Image (cartoon, grey):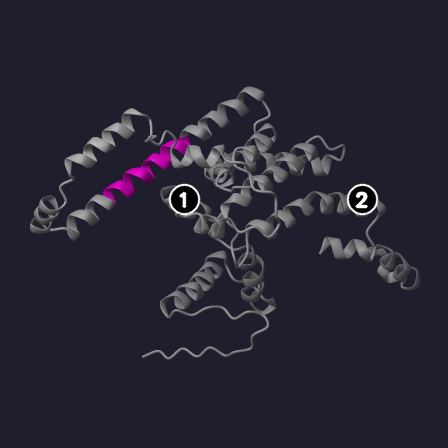
């Protein structure tokens, strides 16, 4: 709304010269200056909202770099010469620090699981998010440990699942049959011993996570799909790909941005402007619950289909 108003700044002035009664409603030069400052400040938030929230949620590998942009603009505006902007930024800074402390680890892990970024993106973002150099190094070390611990949990779950499947598929009689029929000839045993002694068999020394992090990063691509990449490389990183699919699918928010603005305008219309906040919550939540109960989906703007629900 403010961006649109700035485009008609001259129109306001010209119209006021022909309509003297309108002149008292025309913003002053100081008002326009504040509007321009607010717009330039909130433009970053608008861009970030479009990236991290929507009907089709972005994967979590994109969150860290966008949050860095938010932190960067808040820090700049917190020392802005304009007192109005400065006070706004400092209030935002308090809120940012509160929520950043609760969600930073998941976003950082998501960034590492993007083969275009890996550990490079956290190293790039942390100096802004953690201004003190020692804090940045400390959090990078913490991120590596957390990533390793999470990977080991997935390895344990995968091993347990494999053990359960093997025990359920193979009965004791089948096991005896395979043991009797599959005795390795002594000649082959001697040959295997010779290969091991001569260094012909090299035991794997790197885990999937270490192998993934040691590989070169993929060239940047704006149309890159992280989930599709992990699906294509599932045979190479079977355990790590499961972990990546789980982490990358975590949304930054459980509420879509359009549900705050668009749905609110449909509920709180001019004829319902006196509704209490609790009543508005009931209307919004009730609509979502009914759609979930009957498996309904919201129609897109270009669809004019009527949805009929038959209640028995």
Position of 54 with respect to 237 (left or right) is right
| Mark toward the start of the polypeptide (1 vs 2) | 2
Q: Please report the bounds of the magenta region as a residue range.
A: 146-161
Circle 1 residue: 236
Q: Secondary structure at mark 2?
A: helix
Q: Quadrant of the N terminus?
A: bottom right
Disc 1/disc 2 C-alpha distance (Å): 57 Å
Residue 310 point in image, percent of width and height: 37, 80
Position of 36 with respect to 270 (left or right) is right
Residue found 52% across the figure and 55% down from its top: 256
Q: Residues within 10 Å of mark 1 (few under 14, many from 20)?
A: some
Circle 2 residue: 33
Q: Residue furthest top?
A: 134
Nearer the observer, 136 or 97: 136
Residue found 49% across the figure and 68% down from its top: 298
Nearer the observer, 122 or 231: 231
Marks 1 and 2 in Cβ contact (< 8 Å)? no
Q: Quadrant of the C terminus?
A: bottom left
Residue 202 point in image, percent of width and height: 34, 30
Nearer the observer, 133 or 292: 133
Answer with the quarter of the image where residue 294 lies: bottom left
Q: Residue furthest right?
A: 17
Nearer the observer, 38 or 12: 38
- Which mark identifies residue 168? none
Residue found 56% across the figure and 58% down from its top: 258
């Amino acid at each position: 709304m403010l961006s649109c108003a700035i485009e008609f700044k001259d129109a306001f002035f010209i119209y006021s010269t022909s309509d003297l009664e309108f002149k008292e409603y025309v913003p002053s030069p100081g008002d326009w200056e504040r509007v321009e400052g607010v717009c330039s400040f909130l433009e970053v938030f608008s861009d970030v909202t479009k990236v991290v929230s929507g009907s089709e949620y972005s994967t979590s590998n994109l969150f860290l770099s966008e949050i860095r942009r938010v932190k960067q603009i808040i820090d700049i505006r917190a020392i802005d010469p304009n007192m109005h902007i400065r006070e706004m930024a400092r209030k935002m800074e308090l809120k940012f620090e509160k929520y950043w402390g609760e969600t930073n680890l998941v976003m950082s892990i998501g960034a590492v699981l993007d083969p275009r970024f890996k550990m490079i993106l956290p190293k790039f973002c942390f100096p802004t998010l953690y201004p003190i150099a020692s804090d940045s190094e400390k959090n990078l070390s913490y991120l590596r440990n957390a990533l390793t611990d999470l990977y080991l949990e997935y390895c344990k779950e995968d091993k347990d699942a494999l053990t359960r499947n093997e025990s359920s598929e193979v009965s004791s009689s089948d096991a005896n049959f395979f043991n009797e029929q599959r005795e390795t000839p002594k000649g082959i045993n001697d040959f295997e011993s010779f290969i091991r002694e001569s260094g012909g068999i090299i035991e794997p020394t790197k885990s999937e996570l270490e192998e993934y992090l040691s590989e070169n990063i993929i060239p940047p691509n704006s149309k890159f799909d992280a989930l599709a990449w992990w699906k294509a490389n599932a045979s190479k990183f079977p355990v790590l790909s499961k972990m990546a699919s789980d982490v990358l699918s975590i949304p930054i928010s459980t509420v879509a941005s359009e549900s705050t603005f668009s749905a609110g305008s449909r509920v709180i219309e001019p004829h319902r402007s006196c509704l209490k906040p609790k009543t508005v919550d009931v209307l919004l939540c009730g609509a979502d619950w009914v759609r979930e109960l009957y498996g309904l989906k919201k129609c897109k703007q270009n669809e004019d289909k009527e949805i009929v629900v038959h209640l028995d």
